[in-house]
Each structure stands twice: as structure tokens, then as C-alpha cells.
Amino acid sequence: MVFSDHCHDNEILRFFIEHPEIDGVLTGDLLAAQIIQISNRLGKKIPEDIKLIGYNDVKTPSLLSPRLSSVRQPVKEMSEYIIESIIKQIEGEDVPMLTPYQSLLSSERRLKFLKSRSKNNY
């Protein structure tokens, strides 16, 4: 199932009710925040019942409990590399092609563990 960034809670709620076997979700951080709230309404716990990973590393979900694990994409560094590469090409220089697996463009994983810092860590 693909949810848009502007998905309504009722759509997500209906999806989880119709598919109780779902035990993991990878989605953008803002939608992940909605999923945390809906999981609470359904009595499902993150991460025990539903594993949840976000991407984009926006600030809002960090205010939620449990905290969201999120993958930060180095957009600034990627943009700088692209601009430098275009300038080099305009000036006639050869620019090597990089694959997504090369370290310059790899995502920085900023995992904010889903456990609290209290004595009751799970």
C-alpha cells in the first residue's frame, strides 16, 4: 500500500484494521508520526507490535513517544556535489559517475532508538 504525504488518519486506520498482519512500516517521517498516533488508538505498541522507520529526519517526529528511528539523507552535500560536477562539465573537465553505493552519496543513518532513556528501557 502506498500512502501519500497528505493521507488522512481514517485511510491509515482502515488499512491497519484490514491488514492486522502488518508488523513493519518504512515511510516518510511525517506519515510515521501519524502511524504512531494510529497505533496508539489501535492498542499496538511501537516497536513491539509494529516496527517503524522514517526517512527525511524532520524535527516534528522527534517530539513523539516513542522516538522515531529516521534515516537522514545528506541533501546539502548531494546538491553541492551536483553543482560542482555541472561546473566542471561546463569547463570541459571529466566528471566520474558515482553510484548510490559510493560513500559520498550514501545516507547518514541517524538512529534515534525507539526506547526511552528511563530505567524502563526495552
Image (cartoon, rainbow, N blue to C red):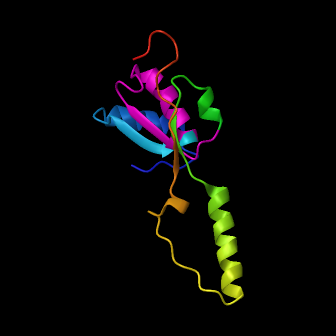
Residue visible at 39% across and 23% down in the picture: 44
| Side of 75 where 118 appears, left or right | left
- 60 falls in the magenta region: no
| Side of 45 where 67 appears, left or right | right
The stretch of residues the image draws in magenta is 30-58
Q: How many circles with numbers are drawn on the protein?
A: 0
Asked whether residue 9 is in view, the answer is no
Relative image position of residue 104 (x, y in whole percent): 55, 61
Residue visible at 69% across and 73% down in the picture: 84
Q: Quadrant of the C terminus?
A: top left
Relative image position of residue 14 (x, y in whole percent): 41, 35
- 37 falls in the magenta region: yes
| Residue extending furthest toward the left | 21
Image height of 96 relative to 42, above or below: below
Image quadrant in which you'd find residue 29 = top right
Image height of 32 relative to 90, above or below: above
* Residue in front for this viewpoint, 25 or 19: 25
Residue visible at 43% across and 35% down in the picture: 52
* Residue in front for this viewpoint, 85 or 61: 85
Relative image position of residue 24 (x, y in whole percent): 36, 37
